[in-house]
């Protein structure tokens, strides 16, 4: 079964100095960059997902801004697909499903942001479409959330969403284990 590396929303606005900085974004980026280098080395297809916000009142990922650009450390190169989306689910009203079908991809290796939003929505949709998923846990990042009078720390949000996905929707592993398996990002 062919695999592709799916990099979700690794865009400038999520990093220090961006309009919506996430906790742990630099560390997640470093791990995503390792996965990207391995995928390129092994000839594994890479698909970059870029969120362009069309929602009224949005404060980040605005069309035409530097913040909406993919971070330079994981910037696409010739031959790598870039798919723009406007919703958390990378499949919704975007050509991701068609791109994967063209590549003959049945398995995704996922890294990106935010764990609790776009990573979660995309992995659940991929599962519903019959795709196998593996998530590089430490190549994803999120932020703290508030509910009623409680603030849930980013680390707890991240862990809770990965725990919910692990087992049924995806296999969740650290980057080091994924890369230590031999040629895990090979097609």
Image (tube, rainbow, N blue to C red):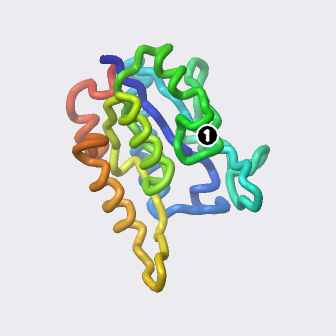
* The quarter of the displayed image where residue 98 is located: top right
Residue 63 left/right relative to 18: right
Q: Is residue 108 above or below residue 155?
A: above
Residue 145 left/right relative to 55: left
Foreground: 152 or 81?
A: 152
Residue 26 seen from this side: no
| Residue ID for mark 1 | 50
Q: Quadrant of the C terminus?
A: top left
Q: Residue at x 54, y 28 (%)?
A: 96
Q: Is residue 76 above or below residue 2?
A: below
Q: Quadrant of the N terminus?
A: top left
Q: Is residue 96 above or below residue 42?
A: below
- Residue 164 appears at what percent x and percent y? 30, 54
Foreground: 110 or 88?
A: 88
- Residue 2 appears at what percent x and percent y? 35, 18
Residue placed farthest to the front in the image? 128
Residue 81 seen from this side: yes
Residue 27 left/right relative to 177: right
Residue placed farthest to the bottom in the image? 149
Q: Residue at x 53, y 35 (%)?
A: 91
Q: Residue at x 56, y 23 (%)?
A: 80
- Residue 112 appears at what percent x and percent y? 47, 46
Q: Residue at x 46, y 46 (%)?
A: 121
Residue placed farthest to the right in the image? 64
């Amino acid at each position: 079964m062919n695999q592709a590396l799916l990099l979700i929303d690794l865009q400038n606005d999520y990093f220090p100095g961006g309009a919506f900085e996430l906790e742990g974004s630099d560390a997640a980026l470093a791990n995503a960059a390792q996965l990207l280098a391995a995928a390129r080395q092994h000839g594994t297809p890479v698909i970059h997902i870029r969120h362009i916000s069309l929602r009224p009142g949005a404060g980040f990922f605005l069309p035409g801004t530097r913040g909406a650009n993919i971070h330079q450390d994981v910037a696409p190169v010739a031959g790598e697909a870039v798919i723009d989306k406007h919703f958390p689910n990378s499949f919704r009203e975007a050509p991701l499903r068609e791109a994967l079908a063209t590549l003959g991809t049945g398995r995704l290796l996922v890294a990106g942001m935010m764990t609790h939003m776009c990573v979660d929505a995309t992995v659940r949709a991929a599962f519903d479409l019959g795709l196998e998923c593996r998530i590089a846990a430490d190549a994803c990042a999120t932020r703290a959330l508030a509910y009623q009078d409680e603030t849930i720390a980013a680390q707890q949000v991240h862990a809770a969403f990965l725990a919910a996905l692990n087992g049924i929707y995806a296999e969740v592993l650290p980057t080091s284990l994924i890369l230590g398996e031999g040629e895990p990002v090979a097609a």
